[in-house]
Image (cartoon, helix red, strand yellow):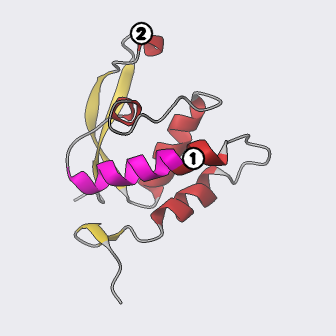
Amino acid sequence: MSAKRNAPGVATEGVPEVIAATVTTVPDCGIDPWWLDGAQRALSLLAESGRIFAADDLRDDPYSVPEPGHPNQWGSLFRAAHRVELIRPVGFTTSRTASRHGGVTRLWRGGAAR
């Protein structure tokens, strides 16, 4: 049985579990399992789409991932997904989220760096 792939050579089967294991390695990190599950699913779908995206896209429709308990959890989610090569950085843009006040945010695309 072959693993589901989102880009050449990048298996995505089981990726949410790997991300969860990576994100929650900090003792008492306080990450809400419900938030983490929804954020992982949305991130996996965006990675599989092949389009360029930012964290803001997870907050928008159709994903509508709510804000986590702490804003740093967004970074942990994306760092873990990058570590397992679900996503790769492709640039920067300014955030559309009001609380970010136009701060710089990374742009991502699904798959390992080529």
Q: Earlier in the sequence, mark 1 or mark 2?
A: 1
Identity, as a three-letter code, of the amino acid under mark 1 = Leu
- Which residue is at the front of the view, 57 or 103? 57
Residue 61 belongs to the span the image colors magenta: no
Q: Is residue 114 shown left or right of residue 95?
A: left
Q: Which mark is residue 51?
A: none
Q: Residues within 10 Å of mark 2 (few under 14, many from 20)?
A: few
Q: Residue at x 38, y 54 (%)?
A: 44
Please determine whether, in this image, residue 39 is positioned above or below residue 103. below
Residue behind mark 2: 101
Identity, as a three-letter code, of the amino acid under mark 2 = His
Q: Is residue 94 shown left or right of residue 28?
A: left
Q: Residue at x 53, y 57 (%)?
A: 19
Q: Secondary structure at mark 2?
A: loop
Q: Secondary structure at mark 1?
A: helix
Q: Residue at x 64, y 29 (%)?
A: 70
**Residue 86 % position (x, y):** 37, 58
Residue most extreme to the front: 62
Q: How far apart are labels 1 and 2 at the CA level? A: 25 Å
**Residue 103 % position (x, y):** 39, 16
Q: Residue at x 41, y 71 (%)?
A: 13
Please determine whether, in this image, residue 49 is positioned above or below residue 53. below
**Residue 66 % position (x, y):** 51, 31
How many marks on residues? 2
* Quadrant assignment, res 2: bottom left
Please determine whether, in this image, residue 55 is positioned above or below residue 24. above
Residue behind mark 1: 36
The residue range painted magenta reads 38-50
Residue 46 belongs to the span the image colors magenta: yes
Tell me the quarter of the image containing the N terminus: bottom left
Q: Residues within 10 Å of mark 1 (few under 14, many from 20)?
A: many
